[in-house]
Amino acid sequence: MYRYIIKRLLLVIPTLVGAAALVFLLMRLIPGDICVVRLGSGGGSFDERAVQACHAQLGLDRPMFLQFVDFVWGFFRGDFGISMWSGKPVLYEIAARFPISLEICILAVVVANLIAIPLGTISALKQNSPIDFVIRVISIAGLATPSFWLGILFILAILDLSQAAFGSPWMPPIDYVPIWQDPLRNLSMAIFPALTVGYRTSAVTMRMTRSAMLEVLREDYIRTARAKGPSKSSISTASAGFLCNPCRTRTTR
């Protein structure tokens, strides 16, 4: 067992090196010159000397092998370089955005579960009914809708609804405020991205919940309970409890 664990841990090193080499080569195979894009992004003019200086600054004038060695060595040292746009360390840019990313991730999981578990359970209990059909359409739409397009729809819906309700369009704040400083402003900024991501995630969980619930409802002990005469609602409640506790289901059988 320990030998297997050690082998799997040692395989992490060549896997990371291979992934780094693949990313490195793909970035170099993309057509164009990043320095030209960087210098021309503001619409200003530049000459060949500026491009060469940019190449020297980024290390692009060095041999490809040395560039790759620096790339891998910087990764293991936690040095991800300097952002070309802000001029700050990349690690600083990641750390600055980590709190809001973590918050949206947690809110998205909460939203996904609040949507998926009740709707998936209802869809299973109302199998092949109009309610089941509507819920399945909602889940399929969540799977088929790209997140960026869904986010655009949320923005347009907020603008239209606020225009109709208050007479002027409203948009949530875009500057990050920690939740412990101003919870209302923080949630008004994070809730809509969380709804967008959570709806996409809930589509998968909804279908899984429906399938698992249908499997439980077809078990022998459910048919036995129905034959003994308890109400359908009590059987459905028990089924949902067994669905959430697989160990208890196996013991009951």
Image (spheres, rainbow, N blue to C red):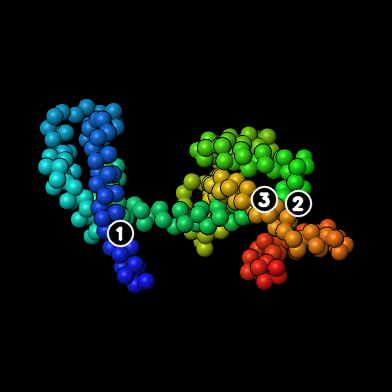
Q: Position of residue 112 (x, y in %)?
A: 59, 52
Quarter of the image that includes the N terminus: bottom left
**Residue closest to the eye, 159 or 127:** 127
Q: Earlier in the sequence, mark 2 or mark 3?
A: 2
Seen at 24% across and 46% down, the residue is: 21
**Residue closest to the eye, 24 or 17:** 17
What amino acid does circle 1 point to? Val
Q: CA distance from mark 1 to mark 2?
A: 45 Å
Residue to which mark 1 is pinned: 12
Q: Is residue 60 above or below residue 208?
A: above
Residue to which mark 2 is pinned: 125
Q: Secondary structure at mark 3?
A: helix
Q: CA distance from mark 2 to mark 3?
A: 9 Å
> Does residue 178 appear to the left or right of 18 in the view shown?
right
Q: Position of residue 51 (x, y in %)?
A: 16, 33
Q: CA distance from mark 3 to mark 1?
A: 37 Å
